[in-house]
Amino acid sequence: MSAAATGYRATATMPLLAEVRRQASRRRTQLALGFMAVLPLIILLAFEFGGDGGDDDNGGGAFSSLVDLATSGGLNFALFSLLVSSGFLLIVVVALFCGDTVASEASWGSLRYLLAIPVPRARLLGVKLAVALGYSLLALVTLVGTALLIGTLRYGWHPLGSTVAAEIPAGEGVLRLVGIVAYLAVILLVVAGLAFLLSVLTDAALGAVGGAVLLWILSGILDQITALGSIRDFLPTHFSDAWLGLLSTPMQTDDMVKGAISAICYATVFWGLAFYRFTRKDITS
């Protein structure tokens, strides 16, 4: 005989769309997505009024070359906007969405009331993870889409410039840009998984967000230490720039495959630990 109340269905609790609307109403969601839309405009204004650095810049490698290409078309402007954001800003945004989602409920004291509805723990965590990942992807697409629109309106529709090969036709350039966005989305799953795990382990949202960002930065620092040798291959940040292989002719995708596999493995482990811990911990807040 079932102990559940008549008419109770676990799958009917905490609807996905309700959580989407709830998170959309939060100020941090609005500010994060708003900033993703405004950032390309800020970069555009910087190019328009910042003057030409020209001879003041020495070297700079691939980054310097991409700066020179940024104003040569909408595709290049979108690529540059993505480049300057991928190193830190996107990390913070993804950590914010995924690290704040459970810890904030605990800090507000509302987590135990959600479970008392009752919402099964695995469902609660699954819905919150899905919505956090959705908003993280939306932030990435908003950034690239806005940059592509603004860049095209200002600089026109031209081939995608490459620092390591000949110009890439605009049609193919769009596909490569989509591939770069998709690869970064996969790489950012590591940050999402780590932030989500920390969100389950702590009641402090700031600790979960900051902890994920700091650990990602630490991985990047360790990756620069060549004395670590092949150990660096197992760091989650080691293949974070492998998307540059899509700008070469022919495309170099070996490192991208390795990076994607590594990111998925890390994210799966982090999410598994989060579910394991959350379904067994005492919820007192």
Image (cartoon, helix red, strand yellow):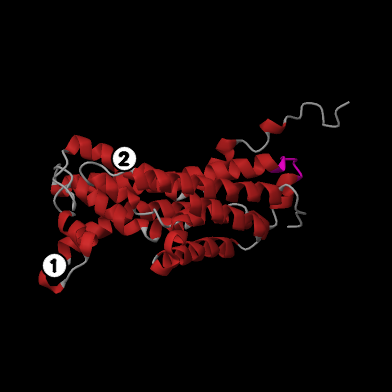
Label at residue 197: none
The residue segment tinted magenta is 116-121
Q: Is residue 26 visible?
A: no
The residue furthest bottom is: 56
Instruction: Name the residue nearer the viewer: 87 or 92.
Output: 87
Q: Is residue 256 visible?
A: yes
Report the residue at 75% width, 53% height from top.
281
Q: Position of residue 259 (x, y in %)?
A: 42, 48
Along the horizontal axis of the image, is 202 left or right of 241?
A: right
Q: Which residue is mark 2?
A: 178
Along the horizontal axis of the image, is 169 left or right of 252?
A: left
Query: Quarter holding the C terminus?
Result: bottom right
Report the residue at 37% width, 60% height from top.
87
Please name the amino acid that badge 1 sits on. Answer: Gly
Along the horizontal axis of the image, is 106 left or right of 96?
A: right
Report the residue at 42% width, 68% height from top.
221
Q: Callout 2: helix, strand or loop?
A: helix
Look at the picture and state if 1 lies above or below 68.
Answer: above
Label at residue 51: 1
SS assignment for the magenta stretch, majority: loop
Bin the neighbour count of mark 2 within 10 Å (Cα to Cα): few under 14, some 14-19, many 20 and up: some
